[in-house]
């Protein structure tokens, strides 16, 4: 095998191993965070982090903010795309309470996104390019849409 082929194979192997390791680490961290939230639903982490389950069964711990009958979450990564258009159904575990609703990503109102993020994630580094900042998803709980008792603080 030529040096070039060995180099390419080595790079591919390193990328695969690195990707698997990062996925495993992320899953491990997410599992630890979710276990902590469920065992201490009114603890320090649970005051800022909820567990969200998407329609397709994926589960993530995410920072959240509840205001005016809405729940906001910032999403890093590409899974925000499920909230485009009409949005997507979600189930949230917030302080030992199960809440369902519909989330929609906010892409066309940068002033609103900046305003909500100033309270949701005020410590995002200033040097981080705006394109790498998370996407804001606004969730309307079913209780708000149906006129039932809301979950706002």
Image: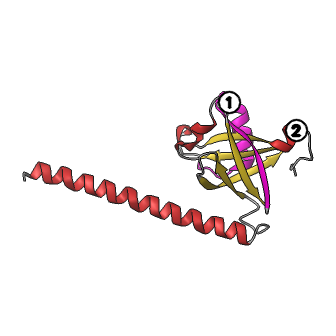
Q: Compute the Cα span from label 2 to label 1.
A: 18 Å
**Residue bearing mark 1:** 86
The residue at 76%/69% (across/down) is: 43
Identify which residue, 53 or 69, lies in the foreground.
53
Q: Position of residue 2 (x, y in %)?
A: 7, 51
Task: Assign a secondary structure to mark 2.
Answer: loop
Residue 8 highlighted magenta (yes or no): no
Give the magenta-colored segment's residue range.
Answer: 97-125
Residue 117 highlighted magenta (yes or no): yes
**Residue bearing mark 2:** 146
Task: Find the residue positioned furthest to the bottom.
Answer: 39
Task: Find the residue positioned furthest to the left.
Answer: 2
Q: Is residue 106 above or below residue 128?
A: above
The residue at 21%/56% (across/down) is: 10
Task: Find the residue positioned furthest to the front.
Answer: 56
- Residue 145 falls left or right of residue 120: right
Q: Is residue 123 above or below residue 44?
A: above
């Amino acid at each position: 095998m030529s040096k070039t082929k060995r180099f390419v194979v080595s790079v591919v192997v390193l990328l695969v191993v690195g990707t698997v390791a990062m996925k495993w680490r992320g899953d491990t961290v997410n599992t630890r965070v979710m276990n902590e939230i469920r065992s201490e639903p009114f603890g320090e982490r649970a005051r800022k982090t909820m567990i969200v389950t998407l329609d397709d069964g994926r589960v993530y711990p995410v920072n959240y903010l509840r205001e005016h009958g809405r729940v906001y979450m910032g999403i890093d990564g590409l899974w925000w795309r499920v909230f485009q258009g009409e949005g997507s159904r979600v189930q949230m575990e917030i302080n030992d309470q199960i809440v369902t609703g519909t989330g929609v990503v906010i892409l066309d109102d940068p002033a609103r996104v900046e305003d909500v993020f100033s309270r949701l994630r005020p410590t995002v580094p200033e040097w981080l390019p705006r394109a790498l900042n998370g996407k804001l998803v606004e969730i309307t709980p079913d209780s708000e849409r149906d006129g039932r008792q809301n979950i706002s603080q």
